[in-house]
Image (spheres, rainbow, N blue to C red):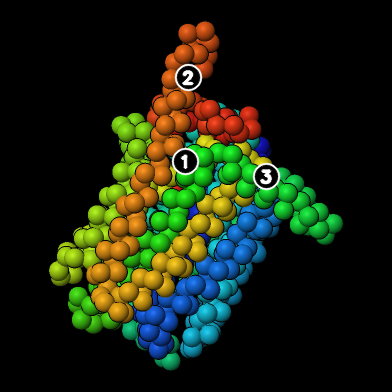
Amino acid sequence: MSALSVRQVRFRYLTLYGLRWLPGGLLMTVMILLLQERGLSLSQIGLVATAQGLVVLALELPTGGLADALGRKPVLLVAWAVALVSLALMAVADSFWMFFLVWALQGVYRALDSGPLESWYVDATLAADPDAEYERGLGWAGTVVGVAIGTGALLGGGLVALGPVGPVSALTLPVLVAAVLQGVSIVALLLLMTEQRPASGPAALRASVVEAPRIVGQAVGLLRRNRVLLALVSVELFWGFGMVTFESLLPVRLSEVVGDADRAATLLGPAGTAAWLANAAGAALTPFLLRRLGAAPAAALMRVLQGVTVVGMGLLAGPIGVLIAYLACYAVHGASNPLHMGLLHRQVDGPYRTSVLSLNSMMGQPAGALGAVVLTALADATSVGIAMLVGAGMLAVAAPLYLPAWRANRAAARSDAARSETDPVLATGPDGSLTGPGPVAVPVAARSAGAGAADPST
């Protein structure tokens, strides 16, 4: 990894990150409508989504530990290959149980994919320059994902507008194109990601499988000892539940407002592009928010603002009002993710980085599955608007969970001020925190990992 410069690592990371999200952009605006076209009700769609959450819950930690023990590249290769298989099956699925299998495979993919690419970027950056500001790259990743998903959404909407091609329905076309792009992503991963793997070969694989539980146990132990990290990971419970509103219910809400599913899908193409460009703009605001508010206060504010935008999606009348709230929601979302992930990375070091990211995702995925079941059932029983209001409340109530990180940063700043009188070498980050996680008891390597200025799911 050290053979690459910081600039090269960042370029490769952002390229792979964009390719990773491009297929998701194609599917995001048509997925729920496709399942409805294939005969599933909203309640059945919610139940199908539980397959992904349950599989992630079972595999998230073991696969995170495996990535830390064996290497990030082989785990990502398997993940992206599983995603390709799930897309191929999605193109032909025509029953509840077939879609349940599709989402189970998506769960395997999510569990394997959760963390290795970002962990590789952070560790490769620190290997090239221990003082590098890797958090700035995480913010740029938010911009890249916005552009990638926005481009995919625009392409998906255009494919739907073209109409059916032979026996392939208009809503199926984006799935086929997404599968092709997933294959391109796998080739790019093989070419661009280089790492000094902890081990290789069959014997090393067996050793890594044995080692993974120990790494997972140490990561969980860090979570028990570190209340800041525990609070940050707990944010995902509310975030995952509430994200169902703008990822799954928004297409149904727009279809309800305009009165036609195909017209709604056509509108969601350009709207999705605009939303993810707004997401990119929000991510670009990360340095400004860090300077003005600090990471933890800004992250808490974003949680509340995102709840407000979802309320707008649920209450505003007419497609224009709903889409304006949708754009605002994604702008806030783009700013939120780099802030949250920057705070999370400051609490861990390299050997456990992927495992801790997996812990973070493990909270979000099952919560998202629960949100899919509860909110879609509520939408069927009452209305989509009421379900969105409930999801908005769940997003906003996560804000106080950033208080421990804020207090830790303030304590670190006071400690730094006291130490500077006798040791002027110590420095602080732009949000007032020490160049490590402050007073939290973590390995020394975490302090260098936290240096610098301060990141979807379909």
Q: Mark 2: few, some, or many residues within 10 Å (few <14, many ≥20)?
A: some
Q: Nearer the viewer, mark 3 or mark 1?
A: 3
- Residue 76, relative to residue 163: is it above or below? above
Q: Quadrant of the N terminus?
A: top right
Question: Looking at the image, which residue is at 26% across and 77% down?
Answer: 382
Residue 38, percent from left and from top: 41, 87
Farthest-out residue, right:
203
Q: Which residue is mark 1?
A: 342
Sequence-first disc among 3 and 1: 3
- Residue 255, relative to residue 313: is it above or below? below
Q: Which residue is mark 3?
A: 218
Amino acid carrying mark 3 in the image = Gln
Q: Is residue 171 visible?
A: no
Q: Are marks 2 and 3 in contact (CB under 8 Å)?
A: no
Residue 328 in which image quadrant:
bottom left
SS for callout 3: helix
Amino acid carrying mark 1 in the image = Gly
